[in-house]
Image: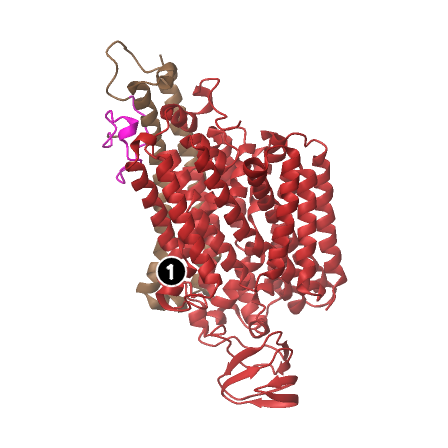
Amino acid sequence: MTAPLSVAAVVVITVATAVIGMRGMRVARTQADFLVAARQVPALLNASAISGEYLSAASFLGIAGLAMLEGLGALWYAVGYAAGYLVLLATVAAPLRRFGAYTIPDFAEGRLASPRLRRWATVMVLVICAFYLIPQFNGAGITLQATLGGPYWIGVVVLGVVVTAGIASGGMKGITVVQAFLYWVKVTAIALPAVVLVLAVSHPPLGTVGGPAPATFTHATDVRFPDATRVTVDRAVTVTGTGTVDGRPVRGPLVLRPGGHTVAAGTSLRFPAGTPAPDVSGATRSGSSWASPLLHLGGRPDHPLAATYGILLATVFGAMGLPHILVRFYTNRDGQAARRTTAFVLLLVSTFYLFPAVFAVLGRLEAPALYLSGRTDSVVLALPRLMVGGIGGELLAALVAAGAFAAFLSTSSGLLIAMAGALSHDIMGRGVRAFRASALVLGAAVTAAGLLVASVPINVLVGWAFAVAASSFCPLLLLGIWWPRLTRVGAMWGLALGGGTSSLAVVASLAGLGRSGWPALLLGEPAIWTVPVAFLAMVVGSLLSPRSLPPNLTDLLATMHLPERLRRPRAGMVGQR
Amino acid sequence: MTAPPGADGVAVEGEDGVAPLGPVREVVRAPVRRPADRSGAPGREDVLRQDDYGRELLGSLMRAQLGATLSVLVPAVVLLALYPLLAVLVPDLASTQVAGVPLTLVVLGGGIYPPLVALGFWYVRRAERVERRFGELLDER
């Protein structure tokens, strides 16, 4: 299913990104320019850039895919991703900008007078960014696979080369404009097709998604099974196809009797119109269960309320702890501008999140074949061609592919800058050359990791990055800004316990530990316990070590909380050098 | 506007960082306790001093800002936490429809965002007002 228009769209967006980035390259001179683009960025442009950097593969593809697969409860991810900015706005935006540190390690060192804490924070930056970056590459692989029909690795390598080369050469002065541009590309690329598709849908009516019926093929549909799949059929259905079902070769018509069947990889089956889609591990469950407002993730359906709160906790508190987003706040003129920018980010991000739900619902109504092929993460890419057809469908598909690639480009470059900045500044020695070398090394490493990652739903991977951020940097920032008694000892306890336990839980989940019940919930959604653990560790550790309070505490608090016009001229810029 | 607990001269170091959940305050008051050798309203220099009085002024600003913060975060938490809880208490919620569209889709697919965004812009106004009043307080003398 090669689609020349989609290929052209991906090429155009990549080249446009490179060109806009290159124009900025000429002004990028010092490391400060690379990192924060000289602090002269107007509010709406800056808000677009932050939103552009924030809306990743998880938002563009993952939310629709996960909500189609697991039910509308998965939309809590989107709500949490947006609400995270309300929390960020109301707690850290202005004080952090006023403090004047470029990065979270800068903040940790400046606020708590501890170079050692700075190195711990650097390690957490690398961990969180890696958890976040790998699913972006995963998404790029899926996208090019879905639009080109080629192998998975092409998308991963293309993204790796473009992003790494762009950052090693351009830096962030260009990227600010690029990120802002990519936000508008993304919002257009998801909103326009969503509107057209809603107008195009005539049958069945929207209301049936909440009805008792399972997902149903509205027209005769060819389903190709890329992997061996276990399906369950409720009533006998006659399919035609080629391949292997239940160990026997199929060529032509076959009656699938009620019960379970094993379909071998590479099999193609044609389902007649009006048949309910066979069940694959509960994915096509009844509409009323699908329309439940609680999160029922595949492996852990037992405690949906706790699961929902777990995801909310991770996303709402994780947003402020994302290293690549915080850097952007220093491109605001002052604390007040930082607040206004953040409010606009909340607006822009919320606007975007109105649309993934549309694709999830239409996907369930119109493309149940994706359940069987296990490709629900590609629903945003697949629907336009499926529902509209003809040149119109091709154009929409091209637009969506461009938007998806914009999502990977923007988030990946932001993450790679944050990682390269942390690695070069704190480990490899400062300066532009170290920054470039770090970008190259990390870009290559993450591209390799992207080639290896299994097809875990994008959103689940990204949710883990948020959980780790919420369990490490979120308490560091909140307590560092609002609680005068935080000490470096307490901060280290919190980073070690919160960041450590959440990271281990994620690794355990990836390794397949905890498949059901409470273990699945506690490992798969660690935020629900690791966030309280991190806060508790920081508070207890601080109370037990009152002597390690920073000596200039009042000065530090004044720098964060006093409006700029009331400050001493020399106040501010703490931790810049 | 009544003085909330803790506003009458608690040094910053003694503050536990959590403001009272009751009626939220928005007026920045001059702390009651002042050095004996001073008179009139506090000035800009006072807040920059590294003494108890300067810390007190700064603490009053931080408490006022924390009040503004909680005045948006408490409603936001209620907004987010309530719907999942309702879904457990009222299982029929999943099959409820509004004009042919599932209620969950109406809420999670769009309805929940306008109040969140409104809270955000409202917070910006409140925080700026707190800072303006604090500045006026210092500039008065």
Q: Examine the structure image and report whether residue A146 is included in the region drawn in magenta.
A: no
**Residue occupying the point 32% across, 22% down:** B55
Q: In the rendering, at what x and y percent does residue A57 appear?
A: 58, 55
Left or right of A557 in this view: A77: right
**What is the three-letter code of the residue carrying label 1?**
Leu
**Residue occupying the point 70% across, 50% down:** A161
Q: The brown chain is which one?
A: B
Image-quadrant location for residue A157? bottom right
> Of helix, strand and loop, which mostly describes the magenta segment?
loop
SS class of the residue under badge 1?
helix
Q: In this view, does A499 lie above or below B128?
A: below
Say which of A120 and A349 sits in front: A120
Please tell me the colour of chain A. red
Q: In the rendering, at what x and y percent does residue A474 appear?
A: 42, 43
Which colour style is shown? by chain
Q: Name the residue under label 1.
A: A522
Q: Is residue A533 above or below residue A142?
A: above
Say which of B99 and B11 sits in front: B11
| Residue A470 visible in this rendered orientation of the protein | yes
Say which of A158 and B25 sits in front: A158
**Residue occupying the point 54% across, 70% down:** A364
Mark 1, other Cα within 10 Å: few <14 / some 14–19 / many ≥20: many
Q: In the rendering, at what x and y percent does residue B11 appear?
A: 27, 26
**Which region shows up in magenta?**
B3-30
Image-quadrant location for residue A76? bottom left
